[in-house]
Every structure is written in C-alpha cells, then in structure tokens.
C-alpha cells in the first residue's frame, strides 16, 4: 500500500476489484500453509522467502503486480525486492487481514 493510499482511503478491497478490470496479477507472499487457509481467488503464491526466484512464475516484468500478505509488512519487502529485480509495476496492496471480500481455501 502506497503512502498516498493511506490518505485516500484506498484499501485492498479496491485493489482486488481494480485487478479484475486491469489484468493485474495478485501475488500472495505468505507461506503456502497460510495461502491454503484462505487467499484471494486467482492469486499466485510466491512466499517472501522465494521472491528472488519470482521470475520463474512472473515472466513479464512489465505486468501489473498487486502484492499482499497478512498485514502488509511482508508484501512491502517483496515489492522492494521485485522492483530491484526489474518489476516496475509492483504495488503493495496491504494485508488480507483487512480484506472483506471472499477468499478461496486450498492451494
């Protein structure tokens, strides 16, 4: 979540809804066990500890990436790493802990 989003009230729910229309890839950087307990439908699971090899899954470095975790802390670190790897359009959208939409269970 960007600094401006704190002032505009934009939250994860708005980003997920936006992703449906703009083709952004939702990236969940929590551990597989957390992902399995509930994630946003269509999200790709790339745990923070494996983010250095994200290029195996995320081949288009120009793609819109909306990155989330539980609270927004891990996704912030993941976005920093992704940007250093050349993913210019990676955005931290916060944590699923505040998400009010439907979640999917299982991997």
Image (tube, rainbow, N blue to C red):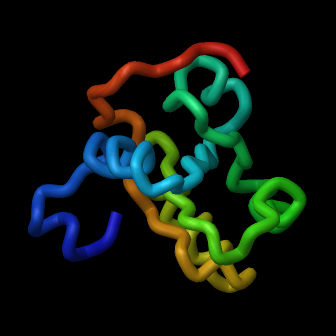
For this view, does 25 lie left or right of residue 7? right
In the rendered view, tell whether residue 53 sits above or below residue 27.
below
Residue 82 picture quarter: bottom right
Question: Residue 63 in the image: x percent, y percent?
Answer: 62, 68
In the rendered view, tell whether residue 88 sits above or below residue 76.
below
Q: Quadrant of the C terminus?
A: top right
Question: Residue 40 in the image: x percent, y percent?
Answer: 50, 31
For this view, does 105 lie left or right of residue 56? left
For this view, does 95 lie left or right of residue 25? left
Residue 6 appears in view: yes
Question: Residue 43 in the image: x percent, y percent?
Answer: 60, 38
In the rendered view, tell whether residue 12 sits above or below residue 7.
above
Residue drawn at 11 percent across, 65 percent down: 8
Residue, far front = 21
Residue drawn at 53 percent across, 21 percent down: 38
Q: How many marks?
A: 0
Residue 71 appears in view: no
Of the pair 96 and 42, the residue shown nearer to us: 42
Q: Quadrant of the N terminus?
A: bottom left
Question: Residue 102 in the image: x percent, y percent?
Answer: 38, 20
In the rendered view, tell whether residue 38 sits above or below residue 94.
above
Residue drawn at 24 percent across, 50 percent down: 11
Of the pair 19 and 77, the residue shown nearer to us: 19
Residue drawn at 10 percent across, 68 percent down: 7
For this view, does 60 lie left or right of residue 5? right
């Amino acid at each position: 979540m960007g600094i401006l989003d704190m002032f505009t009230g934009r939250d994860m729910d708005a980003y997920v809804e936006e992703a449906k229309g703009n083709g952004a890839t939702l990236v969940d950087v929590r551990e597989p066990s957390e992902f399995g307990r509930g994630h946003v439908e269509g999200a790709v699971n790339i745990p923070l500890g494996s983010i250095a090899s994200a290029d195996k899954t995320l081949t288009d470095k120009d793609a819109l990436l909306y990155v989330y975790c539980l609270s927004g802390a891990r996704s912030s670190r993941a976005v920093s790493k992704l940007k250093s790897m050349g993913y210019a359009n990676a955005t931290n959208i916060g944590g699923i802990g505040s998400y009010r939409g439907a979640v999917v269970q299982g991997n």
